[in-house]
Amino acid sequence: MAHQFWPIMKGMTPETVTAAAAPALPLTLEGASVLHQMMRFRRAAWRAVSADGRAEILAEAAAVLSRMETHAEGRESALYSLLGHKGDLLVVHFRRSFEELNQAEIELARLRLGDYLEPATSYLSVVELGLYESSAKVYAGLASKGIDPNSEEWKTGIEEVLARQRTAMAPRLWPRIPESKYLCFYPMDRRRGESVNWYRESMADRQRMMAEHGLVGRRYAGEVRQIISGSIGFDDWEWGVDLFAEDPLVFKRLIYEMRFDQVSALYALFGSFYVGLRVLAAELGGLLNF
């Protein structure tokens, strides 16, 4: 195939041609569909229900939620009691598709308990793994063969790589919801205004900064579990971040330390933070009957 998009100009190496002409978009792998539902509990209306009526409503909800919190092929939900004014309950759903997320949302709304829950906000995303390092190597490999970007041969080569990566990364693409006591969730963007713009940086620079960023997270590997989900085109921010830990102070330490690396210090924008304590379905009565 002709090197239509990869001309070797005087003074340029194949590597510099690759960097100049390769797609700016890093390859990504997508897995579980994720929905966060933040809700407020209508306490006054709940108190007006008889003790027997509350028991029946809770029994129905506990049965459904117990089934939903049982892991089955990437289909799992978890309930959290939120701290602060942003909501009372947070339900996190991991499913195999948006259709299954929709069914989980409908199933929850059908409960009689749903009459006492008001949506505060929600967040829709998919588990995402960014492949910055692999992207550069794959693009360079295809370029060295004279394959034109975005040609059918190019797309086939990309898909072969992604297929292998999906198999290797399956546990991270379809994770279980950790059983940790605490959850911290927040959405975030990469800055694209003012004096700096993440999306105008080169692939090589973004790869370098993300590698440095990842080093901080790896230092906390034994204390916190992180699940990143992509939401570009799905919700108001670009990514959602879930952190799971037994000690909530780990959230503060990790996020504070990350503030000092280049990715966060220059390019990160953060949305609202939600922190909650894990509540099993069987414990729902103790949470709501007060």
Image (cartoon, rainbow, N blue to C red):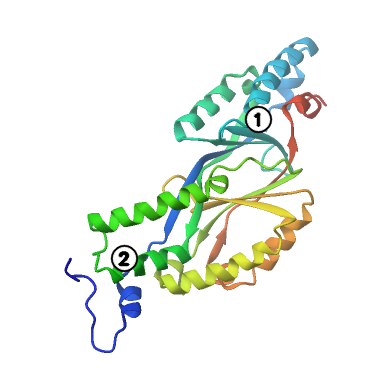
The residue shown at (35%, 70%) is 140
Tell me the amino acid under the disc marked 1: Glu
Which residue occupies the foreground of this view, 123 or 42? 123
> According to the image, label 1 marks what residue?
69
Mark 1 or mark 2, earlier in chain: 1
The residue shown at (44%, 55%) is 28
Give the image location of residue 18, x and y in percent.
Answer: 33, 74
- Residue 57: image quadrant is top right
- Residue 128 in sight in this render: yes
Which residue occupies the foreground of this view, 142 or 29? 142
- Residue 232 in sight in this render: no
Give the image location of residue 215, x and y in percent.
Answer: 63, 67
The residue shown at (58%, 71%) is 212
- Placement of the N terminus among the 4 image quadrants: bottom left
Q: Residues within 10 Å of mark 2 (few under 14, many from 20)?
A: some
Query: In this view, which residue lies farthest toward the bottom?
Result: 11
Element on which disc 2 rests = helix
As drawn, is 6 to the left or to the right of 121? left
Image height of 261 relative to 217, above or below: below
Give the image location of residue 245, x and y in percent.
Answer: 74, 50
Give the image location of residue 264, x and y in percent.
Answer: 58, 67
Which residue occupies the foreground of this view, 2 or 91? 2
Image height of 257 relative to 224, above or below: below
Q: Residues within 10 Å of mark 1 (few under 14, many from 20)?
A: some
Tell me the amino acid under the disc marked 2: Leu
> According to the image, label 2 marks what residue?
142
In space, the residues marked 1 and 2 are separated at their CA atoms by 44 Å
The residue shown at (41%, 61%) is 26
Element on which disc 1 rests = loop
* Numbered label tally: 2
Q: Nearer the viewer, mark 1 or mark 2?
A: 2
- Placement of the C terminus among the 4 image quadrants: top right
